[in-house]
Image: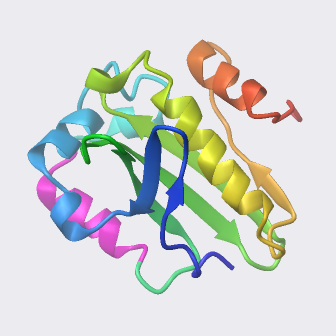
Amino acid sequence: MLRSFTSVYGRHVRLEPLSAQDITEEYVSWLNDPRAVRFSNQRFFTHTMASCNQYHASFIDTPHLLLKIVINSTGQMVGTMTAYASVHHGTVDIGILIGPAAWGKGIGQDAWNALIGWLSRNPSVRKITAGTMRPNVSMVRIMERAGMTLEA
């Protein structure tokens, strides 16, 4: 379903598969930053290089994607995205994590739009979903600006 993914470009970012080399102390620090994960289930865990490498390995030989968000002009990784595919249902549930240094710059919206666009052109994808807590106003706005609608 999603195995054909290589890279997708937005206006200012590109999405590429996250490699084991991309799992750095900085990446781990994003997952352990209470501000960055305050609306995520990741807030209930303490992450380590080992746990992040294990998570990365869990995507191998699956229909799911674990992507890095890279600034086109600098090559700097500033976040990650996930796309969990249900092959039988033709659905994909996406998520995003932006490192705090990149907040408020439109990077999340650009990355979100790029992935939604790519998924929308994939004939095996019938529906794209995502979720967040209602108080996560920034994420709600990203979804709404991308054309997503509230279902439940």
Depth check, front residue: 31 or 66: 66
Picture layout, residue 143 above or below residue 34: below
Picture layout, residue 95 above or below residue 108: below
**Residue 102 coordinates in the image, percent (x, y):** 33, 25
Q: Residue furthest front?
A: 73
The residue drawn where x is 52% and y is 81% is 62
Q: Which residues are magenta?
A: 47-59
The residue drawn where x is 27% and y is 68% is 19
Whether residue 107 is in magenta: the answer is no
**Residue 45 coordinates in the image, percent (x, y):** 30, 41
Quadrant where the N terminus is found in the figure: bottom right
**Residue 31 coordinates in the image, percent (x, y):** 28, 38
Q: Quadrant of residue 54?
A: bottom left
Colour scheme in use: rainbow
**Residue 94 coordinates in the image, percent (x, y):** 62, 50
Q: Is residue 126 left or right of residue 47?
A: right
Q: Quadrant of residue 29?
A: top left
Depth check, front residue: 30 or 6: 6
Quadrant where the C terminus is found in the figure: top right
Q: Is residue 125 left or right of residue 18?
A: right
Picture layout, residue 119 above or below residue 81: below
The residue drawn where x is 74% and y is 26% is 145
The majority secondary structure of the magenta stretch comes to helix
The residue drawn where x is 31% and y is 40% is 73
Q: Is residue 106 left or right of residue 149?
A: left
Labels in figure, total: 0
Depth check, front residue: 138 or 122: 122
